[in-house]
Image (tube, rainbow, N blue to C red):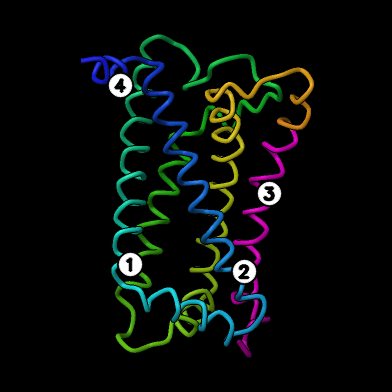
């Protein structure tokens, strides 16, 4: 069967990594947009959260889909990592990189593991909080703890490092490689991770430093 052969091939695995990575990136963008309302006010953020959870079926379907994509991304990433270790090749790279970032490429499994641990802690922290506590209060309570907030900062730094190589790899797999646009691609591999680091990291700092005490 052609699909099984495609998935079993190195090219097929890279395509799955790129597609699942793109879907996770789009989810990250939507999550960032929602979390950015924290910078507006408690009422705006709580209103956003209440509206979102007023559609439990949609949330369930969307969450299950993201979980499945995340699982596929992890499993295929592990397979590629083991495969590339055997062949002594770089992890799912497809061409000469526009901007060298050996730290990001060599630490992809470790930054990925850090992200996985963060997701588990993040989900459990919100899923198993006080039953009737408003989500805005949960955010303030959790990130108000210095070491919990510090853990978030470390996780966001790992995410930025992971994205700096993963975003480039995704673009290369999709064939986005042209001398005219390579300088822009090079900048995007820095700008995109930095954007998420500043947005999410800023939220953690907002609460852990006490600036958000009146939130």
Residue 176: quarter of image: top right
* Vertical relation: 125 (above or below) 134: above
Q: Secondary structure at mark 3?
A: helix
Q: Nearer the viewer, residue 140 or 50?
A: 50
Instruction: Tell me the tag on residue 194.
Output: 3
Give the CA distance from mark 1 to mark 4.
33 Å
* Vertical relation: 121 (above or below) 186: below
Give the CA distance from mark 2 to mark 3.
15 Å
Magenta span: 187-215
* Vertical relation: 80 (above or below) 53: above
Q: Secondary structure at mark 4?
A: helix
Within-10-Å neighbours for mark 3: few <14, some 14–19, many 20+: some
The answer to whether the residue labelled 4 contacts the one labelled 3, judged by CB atoms less than 8 Å apart, is no
Q: Residue furthest top?
A: 87
Is residue 158 toward the left or the right of residue 100 in the image?
left
Q: Which residue is drawn at the image coordinates 32% and 38% (left, top)? A: 72
Residue receiving disc 4: 7
The answer to whether the residue labelled 1 contacts the one labelled 4, judged by CB atoms less than 8 Å apart, is no
Q: Quadrant of the N terminus?
A: top left
Q: Secondary structure at mark 1?
A: helix
Numbered marks: total: 4
Where is residue 57 shown, x and y percent of the image? 28, 68
Of the image marks 1 and 3, the number of the one nearer the N terminus: 1
Where is residue 24 shown, x and y percent of the image? 46, 46
Give the CA distance from mark 1 to mark 3.
26 Å
Q: Nearer the viewer, mark 2 or mark 3?
A: 2
Where is residue 125 shown, x and y percent of the image? 37, 70
Of the image marks 4 and 2, the number of the one nearer the N terminus: 4
């Amino acid at each position: 069967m052609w699909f099984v052969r495609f998935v079993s091939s190195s090219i097929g695995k890279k395509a799955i990594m790129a597609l699942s990575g793109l879907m996770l990136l789009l989810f990250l963008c939507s999550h960032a947009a929602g979390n950015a309302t924290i910078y507006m006010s408690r009422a705006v953020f709580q209103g956003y959260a209440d509206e979102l959870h007023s559609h439990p079926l949609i949330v369930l379907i969307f969450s299950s889909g993201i979980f499945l994509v995340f699982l596929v991304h992890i499993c295929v990433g592990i397979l590629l990592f083991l495969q590339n270790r055997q062949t002594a090749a770089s992890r799912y790279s497809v061409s000469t990189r526009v901007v060298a970032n050996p730290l990001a490429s060599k630490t992809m499994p470790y930054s990925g593991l850090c992200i996985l641990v963060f997701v588990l802690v993040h989900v459990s922290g919100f899923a198993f909080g006080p039953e009737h506590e408003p989500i805005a209060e949960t955010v303030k309570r959790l990130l108000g703890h210095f070491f919990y907030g510090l853990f978030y900062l470390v996780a966001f730094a790992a995410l930025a490092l992971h994205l700096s190589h993963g975003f480039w790899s995704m673009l290369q797999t999709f064939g986005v490689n042209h001398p005219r646009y390579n300088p822009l691609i090079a900048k995007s591999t820095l700008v995109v991770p930095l954007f998420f680091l500043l947005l999410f990291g800023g939220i953690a700092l907002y609460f852990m430093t006490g600036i958000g005490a009146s939130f």
